[in-house]
């Protein structure tokens, strides 16, 4: 990608959590270690079922005494409901932040926001927060903005693009979105590449779903993975990719020749020519450094 783009992520909502118990509350719930969060460092994490299956993913950012949760709007109400159930007598208050979330990506994104290339780095610019996406720095910069945020004034060289352009950028990197590529109450965390996307800690101690996640990690029982899909044709979520009439992958997202699919690792062929539909390719994302087939 050669141009600097900015996109309003209309499908994202920011929740605000405050109260004297909020840090402990989150530390006991989420998959990542809250010790990593500061006003200069955010993190990616998830909420799981007690059986270790995915429910929600989000980005956690600290701003003053509050913790902000950047989550998907479609499933915000379910997340709030679950957080409220776990809250019990804890002194924690939940509200919704006004404003929008933006993505700044392409050549020079980090430089334009005065940020390094380190995933998770945060700076405050006025009342707005700029952060390098904690999943992968190649995704670019995320902006948690106030209602009066002026795009043209803040980033005069950026081209305003729709969400389909940002989705194409994300899919090209093979980075999944929860609720779309990671199916609630079906997928396990490590199937969704959470370890490589900086979304899980194996040293923090207990959290909801921790036991099965740790067991999966240490017994190397990951049988499926989210991979990139490349195809010069049309696919839609739910479509099957087959080898000799056996399903080896299910498409989760697809747009403009790029997508994400859940792949059965034991059936992954070395030669893509045998796959159906003809011409489809399944590609291990570059951020997964070690062979996993």
Image: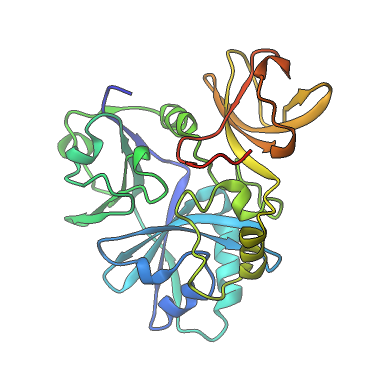
Q: Judge left or right: residue 189 versus residue 289.
A: right
Q: Judge left or right: residue 60 versus residue 227.
A: left
Measured from the top left, where is residue 205 in percent x and y? 53, 75
Q: Judge left or right: residue 109 versus residue 268.
A: left
Measured from the top left, where is residue 194 in percent x and y? 53, 52
| Residue occupying the point 46% across, 35% down | 286
Between 32 and 18, the residue placed more toward the observer is 32
| Residue occupying the point 47% across, 64% down | 32
| Residue occupying the point 26% across, 55% down | 122
Measured from the top left, where is residue 48 in percent x and y? 62, 62
**Rendered position, 194 above or below 156:** below
Q: Judge left or right: residue 54 versus residue 103.
A: right
- Quarter of image, res 6: top left
| Residue occupying the point 51% across, 53% down | 195
**Rendered position, 153 above or below 281:** below
Measured from the top left, where is residue 225 in percent x and y? 63, 42
Q: Classify the position of the C terminus by image quarter.
A: top right
């Amino acid at each position: 990608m050669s141009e600097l783009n900015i996109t309003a992520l209309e499908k994202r909502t920011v929740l605000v959590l405050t109260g004297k118990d909020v840090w402990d509350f989150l530390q006991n719930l989420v998959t990542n270690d809250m010790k990593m969060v500061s006003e200069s460092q955010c993190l990616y994490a998830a909420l799981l079922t007690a059986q270790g299956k995915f429910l929600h993913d989000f980005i956690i950012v600290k701003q003053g005494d509050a913790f902000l949760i950047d989550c998907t709007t479609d499933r915000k109400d379910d997340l709030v409901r679950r957080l409220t159930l776990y809250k019990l007598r804890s002194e924690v208050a939940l509200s919704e932040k006004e404003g929008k979330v933006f993505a700044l990506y392409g050549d020079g994104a980090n430089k334009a926001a005065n940020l390094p290339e380190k995933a998770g780095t945060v700076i405050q610019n006025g009342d707005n927060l700029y952060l390098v996406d904690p999943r992968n720095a190649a995704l670019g910069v995320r902006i948690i903005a106030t209602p009066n945020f002026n795009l043209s004034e803040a980033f005069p060289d950026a081209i305003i693009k729709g969400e389909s352009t940002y989705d194409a950028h994300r899919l090209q990197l093979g980075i999944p979105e929860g609720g779309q590529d990671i199916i609630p109450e079906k997928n396990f965390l490590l199937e969704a590449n959470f370890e490589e996307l900086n979304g899980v800690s194996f040293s923090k101690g207990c959290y909801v779903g921790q036991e099965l996640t740790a067991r999966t990690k240490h017994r190397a029982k990951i049988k499926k993975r989210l991979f990139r899909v490349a195809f010069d044709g049309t696919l839609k979520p739910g479509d099957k990719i087959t080898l000799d009439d056996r399903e080896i992958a299910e498409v989760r997202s697809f747009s403009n020749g790029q997508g994400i699919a859940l792949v059965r690792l034991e059936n992954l062929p070395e030669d893509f020519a045998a796959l159906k539909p003809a011409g489809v390719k399944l590609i291990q994302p570059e951020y997964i450094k070690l062979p996993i087939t």
